[in-house]
Amino acid sequence: MPPPIRLKDHERDARLIRARVLFGGAALVLLTMLLMFRMYYLQVVQFEHHSTLAENNRIHVQSLPPTRGMIYDRNGVVIADNRASFSLTLTRERAGDWEQVLDSIVEILELDNDSRELFEKRIRQGRRPFEPVPVMFELSEEQIARIAINQFRLPGVEVSASLVRYYPQQEHFAHSVGYVGRINETELKNLDPVNYSGTHHIGKTGIERFYEEQLHGQVGYEEVETNARGRVLRVLNRVEPVSGQDIYLTLDSNLQEAAELALDGRRGAIVALDPNNGEVLAMVSQPSFDPNPFVTGISFKAYGELRDSLDQPLFNRVLRGLYPPGSTIKPMMAVAGLDAGVITPKSRVFDPGFYQLPNNKHKYRNWNRYGDGWVELDLAIARSNDTYFYDLAHKLGIDRMHDYMSRFGFGQRVALDMFEETAGLMPSRDWKRNRYRQPWYPGETLILGIGQGYMQTTPLQLAQATALMASKGKWIRPHLARSVGGLQPIVDAQEPPDIVLRDEKFWEPARLGMENVLHGARGTARKVGDTAQYRIAGKSGTAQVVAIKQGERYDRDKVQERHRDHALFIAYAPAENPAIAVAVMIENGESGSGVAAPIAKQVLDAWLLDEDGELKVQYQTEAQREISEVRP
């Protein structure tokens, strides 16, 4: 029998449908409420937050780097300038595969592999996010056109106009003014990230480095509205940058040129100071180099040639070159001996051509092997008699020598605003004990007395010691800046004390001896002095590069050119009223009086004589002015 057919329960079905409708309706209402609550939360509760995010996507702050201060010589001649240049920049965050973009740049501009390596090095250096990095400077019109045509292949790449440092004097002031270069990662960590935002260069050497803070200025900024691609639509706010301060140097372009011409391509250095105020009038180190390629990025090949050159053009001989001073220190030794009371102006020493310590057979040679007989102080300086100064050094002793020579600036940094300066070496007992673990020997005192042995000086130190002889011990540190931003440069808070002697008259015998070097009957540089329009006080020096065995003579034909003696000469003039002090060092020049002295005179003439070859009025004595006035 078939099962009974169940009748449909319409009431139960209706209840089920109503329950489902109610549940669906409730769920719909709940979801609608959640959506409305979320909308309320986003649009009302977090309105400020999301408005700021949206505004930040539209508004950007761009840095405005300041214009770097200019550098002039004392007469207003431009030494460091800023000139407009079109640069190629790349923003990594907008470039995508930036390495591929670099390849495209090289292909489009037809550059070599060295340029590609240089571009990549610049991109990889430390930088801030979304900051355009210059990869190439000084674009030509053709290069700009090629970039514009291929812009679709170069995302994140732009051509921008900017001011780039330029040195119109090129190599003439490279060692004194220095140059700027790209900021490296180490420098970036130590710089103010706000003030240097948008700046890609910083002073690397010389004045550019020492006065970086003053030359740089203060960064500005502008708020700009951009589109989705980062293109600027309009400027909303702008704060102008503050340009760096201009600097006027103490250097004189004409004197600098005269000094370079006097060197005539020789390896060497010349420093000229004003002994009355410490101003550096000329500062020449040759050979030199053009600093301009360092600004925009010198190629690896070009830098390698400069770095590996046997003549070392990158080496600043004025500040970093260390040379035995030779006989140039004999006037200072004379002042020390007089003040210490171990000699008088009339003290005599017999010179048979050598000197011997008591109970010692070793002979310390005089440059004149035949000797000068009985020698007093005046003649000892004029003739540069080694025997006299061997004896003086023995009487002084190393301790007093070290004390007096240190007062003249030897063995210490003497400059006020020159980063690269080396301290040199003024040896002492303690120095040798610490350096070699040996005692000081009497023979070392003797050779130190004629500027040989361990003693090492820079041309700047020799110039400063000469200025101290000219000013009778008045200490003023040499400096390159004459004014910064229209104001006087930094003042030295630790100026060394003046050299105060027991009696002021002790300066005169040494100064008179220096005059007789050029104007005395037996002076070593009398040929130079005979042609001078004024009186010069000077001293020649010859510094050994390689030692000569006892009993042997110096034979230039048997010595390689770079092993020959260095030639030195120091001078100040006019002797009666010093206005300029000069130190000349010629590498392997051999003769201080024969090679360096004529060069020193050319520098003195360039500063002291007028266009007619006459001594300028401001440097004449009253007697000379009277003579000039009565001349027809």
Image (spheres, rainbow, N blue to C red):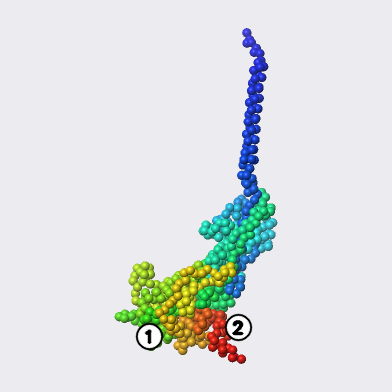
Compared to residue 313, the image places residue 357 above or below, namely below
Q: Observer-nearest residue: 501 or 443?
A: 501
Marking on residue 611: 2
Tally the marks: 2
**Mark 1 falls on what kind of element?**
loop
**Mark 2 falls on what kind of element?**
loop
State the residue at coordinates (50%, 67%): 419
Compared to residue 577, the image places residue 8 above or below, namely above
> Picture quarter containing residue 329?
bottom left
Q: Observer-nearest residue: 475 or 531?
A: 475
Q: Which residue is mark 1?
A: 347
Q: Residues within 10 Å of mark 2 (few under 14, many from 20)?
A: few
Q: Residue furthest top?
A: 1
Q: CA distance from mark 2 to mark 1?
A: 45 Å
Q: Observer-nearest residue: 571 or 289?
A: 571
> Picture quarter containing residue 289?
bottom right
Q: Is 114 displayed left or right of 505 in the figure?
A: right
Q: Position of residue 91 (x, y in %)?
A: 61, 54
Q: Amino acid at mark 2?
A: Glu
Q: Position of residue 299 (x, y in %)?
A: 57, 63
State the residue at coordinates (61%, 73%): 76
Q: Earlier in the sequence, mark 2 or mark 1?
A: 1
Mark 2 vs mark 1, foreground winner is 1
Q: Position of residue 350 (x, y in %)?
A: 36, 86
Marking on residue 551: none
Q: Amino acid at mark 1?
A: Ser
> Mark 1 and mark 2 in contact (Cβ < 8 Å)?
no
